[in-house]
Amino acid sequence: MTLGRWRWLLRRLTRRIWFRAGLFSALAIATALLGAWASPYISWSLSARIGADAVDNILGILASSMLTVTTFSLSTMVSAYSAATSNVTPRANVLIMEDSTTQNVLSTFIGSFLFSLVGIIALSTGIYGEEGRVVLFGVTILVIGFILVTLLRWIDHLSRLGRVTETTQRVEEAAIEAIRERRSTPYLGCRPLADRRAGLPSGARLVASRAIGYVQHIDVEALSQLAAAADARLFVLRLPGELADPTEPILAVDGGPADEAALSACFTIGDRRSFDQDPRFGICVLTEVASRALSPATNDLGTAVDVIGRLLRVLAAWAAPTDAEEGAIDNVFVPPLRVDDLFDDAFLAVGRDGAGVVEVGIRLQKALRTLSRLDHPGFADAARRHARLALERAELALDLETDKQALRALASEI
């Protein structure tokens, strides 16, 4: 397993709530036992001025209150997940679960509870002594101050957790981050493959996936090592976010023999898409939010218009100038993300579901007009195609001729 694969796994691991809670818990236990180690360095006169029962009472109150606050916070977090599922989209739940503020708050409360519990147990066994109580007392005061700051942050965060605007903003930020990362390494650090079919050498052997699911990560460094060992060139045919199955190839091999099982193992296949190496996923999630808002059951035009603005910013990030890194891996070829695919993910569903709403149609045409004027190859053609398609749908769905004329005027500017 290469360093790139380890970095990806570590990044996924650190986003899990149990990882951060476990880290805080271990730190809390070590802090609670600090008094036993530091007791020889505390003067007897200082320990005599602090009552023997001062720490016991504080730790008892802290343990009972932190258990209650943790239970309440967990129920609030579950309610936020449910709200995001019903009001936004289930695909956005992963971003709420990976929210660093929520994880830090819960980890602080759990760690404080364990700190208090271990401190009470250690006091009952007498391992601290009079001098060790002074250290425990000082650390307890610091923990209380840390809890107070965390509670204030948690109160402010609760007012936004699970709300539609807050969740769509998180999706937008995740999509823009993935877009910028792919823009800096458009071919994942490899050589470009312009055409997945016509660009393949004649006689290249095709390797299919042994599992059915979405490509979540490609270990291009491991592919390069396998290609070098077999004196071959490898052509990636499935990008992260695309569906892999045993009937379609994910890789083509040109050259010497290579272990197909080892090649397939370089592709991480999962049952759902992720935001990391997949810029299109964030765009698809934003589109889902807009489609849900335009459904008759929801009928939230403001959210649909807001999402179109967010899609505009996400695609503008793809057109922004960047210093793309030259691919250092010369024996692996990776296809680029197509501009047409990005525009299809962003505007097909919105143009279809919002065809009968003139406000959505106007905002969509204005967004496409802006994108057509950005300095990026392919943006103008893709924007014109979607503007024409959205106008055709609106012509069929709208009844008032004035609304149709307004959309025609905007579409003619693209």
Image: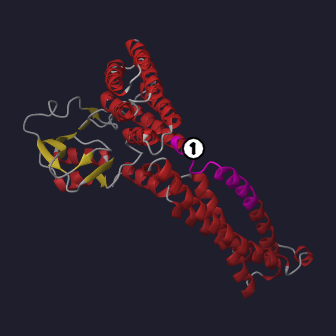
Q: How is the image coloured?
A: secondary structure
Q: Is residue 127 visible?
A: yes
Compared across the picture, whether 242 is left or right of 368 comes to left
Of the 4 image quadrants, the one containing the C terminus is: top left
Relative side of 105 to 14, left or right: right
| Residue 5, horizontal then vertical, whole percent | 37, 51
* Residue 261 falls left or right of residue 75: left
Please name the residue that numbered disc 1 is placed on. 166
- Of residue 173 and residue 312, the one placed in the foreground of this image is 312
In the image, which residues are magenta?
Answer: 146-168
Q: Is residue 325 above or below residue 260?
A: above
Judged left or right of residue 319, residue 188 is left
Which residue is painted at 48% across and 52% down in the image? 86
Q: Residue 164 in magenta?
A: yes
Q: Looking at the magenta stretch, what is its main secondary structure?
A: helix
In the image, residue 146 sits, relative to residue 245, either above or below, namely below
Identity, as a three-letter code, of the amino acid under mark 1: Glu
Is 242 magenta? The answer is no
